[in-house]
Image (spheres, grey):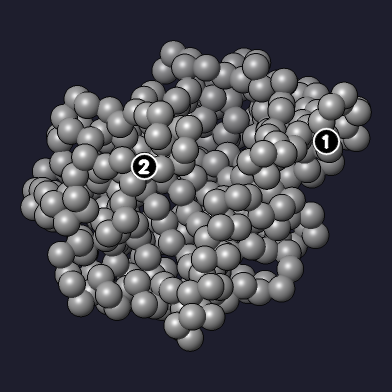
Amino acid sequence: MTPSPLPFHVQRLQKPDGRALSLYGLEPVELASEVPSPSPEPVDARPVMRWHPLRGEWVMYAAHRLGRTFLPPPEYNPLAPTSDPEHPTELPRGRYDIAVFDNRFPSLTLNAPDAPEAPGTAQRPGVGKCEVVVFSQNASGRLADLTEAQMALLLGVWAERTTVLGDTGKIRSVLAFENRGVEVGVTLHHPHGQLYAYDHVPPVQATMLAQARQWRAEHGEAWLGAFVAAERQTAVRVLRDEGLALSVVPPFARYTYETWVVPARPVGLLAELDPAETLALARVLKDALLRLDALFGVRMPYLLTVHQAPVGGAPEPDFPLHIEIYPYLRAPGRLKYLAGTEQGAGEFANDKFPEVAARELREVALEHL
């Protein structure tokens, strides 16, 4: 696999409980304290997976996660740099921009023990990897507050971690994501996201790959290239076009203000972007997040997901690298709840045409954010 598209500084460390910690910076990383951990003892993680025969998918079980941190007061923020050695957090003090560490309460682990037999169902160890990505040392900030250079660094970090995880020989798919807002179930408000690395290709990514392959077979070109060309031609759903990257409300949006951030050149992995493409994608992503917050004048609760091609096997050039943002407000003060047709049948119902939502997002004022 190719390395990260952008150069950066990184320092690899180990926590007292044995978990890995990587600190990334635009400038050389400098530590100003010892590497901490909320507890010196590792959590006994024994994740398992059970097969759902009717949906054709695995379900993760991780009973140890019941003890994970839940909405702590600001003075006990585990994602802030440690200020009191008597009450250690996950991060040290020092100069760095982004931190990545092994999740203390993982849903999947690379060394998951053998799973006991379960009567009446297929069960196996929950093999994979879960990492936490802290976007900033600013506890009250947003992902959108990162500078364009820091946003590009984050894209590089996601690319590098995908490469590292794919090279373990146990991982087939890596999903980077951010949940923001209590409406989405966030339990820690410090700006952060997660990486889930699976030993298989999950259903959503498997379907995307199958559909992209079918498009190639029928049209002789990559789906993403055709999508970008069509959106530029119609122009009504494009939010910002940087030439090498753009944002759109897709014509098939399931959420009212669903936003996609895509490279103009079809690639499957962040690591396949060149530095100029990475910077353009960073600018467009920052702009898209600012627009969502400006729309109703509140911090938009959302789920952001980074979709990349499978790893650890043969290249999949048809998979379309893209970022999807699902905003959870459909109107001021009105949340989007998944209804019966969406939960029970997987068929979404949208209250607003994407062309109208795109126009509203284009027209928001960004000067004061």
Identify which residue, 191 or 85, lies in the foreground: 191
> The residue under label 1 is which amino acid type?
Ala
- Left or right, 69 with respect to 60, comes to left
Q: Is residue 149 visible?
A: no
Residue 126 horizontal/vertical position (percent): 77, 38
- Left or right, 280 with respect to 319, comes to left
Residue in the image at 27% along x and 28% along y:
335
In whole angstroms, how far apart are the C-alphas of marks 2 and 1? Answer: 30 Å
Residue 187 horizontal/vertical position (percent): 47, 23
Identify which residue, 137 or 199, lies in the foreground: 199
Secondary element type, mark 1: loop
Q: Which residue was labeled with disc 2?
A: 348
Residue in the image at 25% along x and 70% along y:
231
Numbered mark located on residue 122 in the image: 1
Dot 2 and dot 1 residues touching (CB under 8 Å): no
> The residue under label 2 is which amino acid type?
Phe
Q: Is residue 300 visible?
A: yes
In this rendering, the answer to whether 231 lies above or below 71 is below
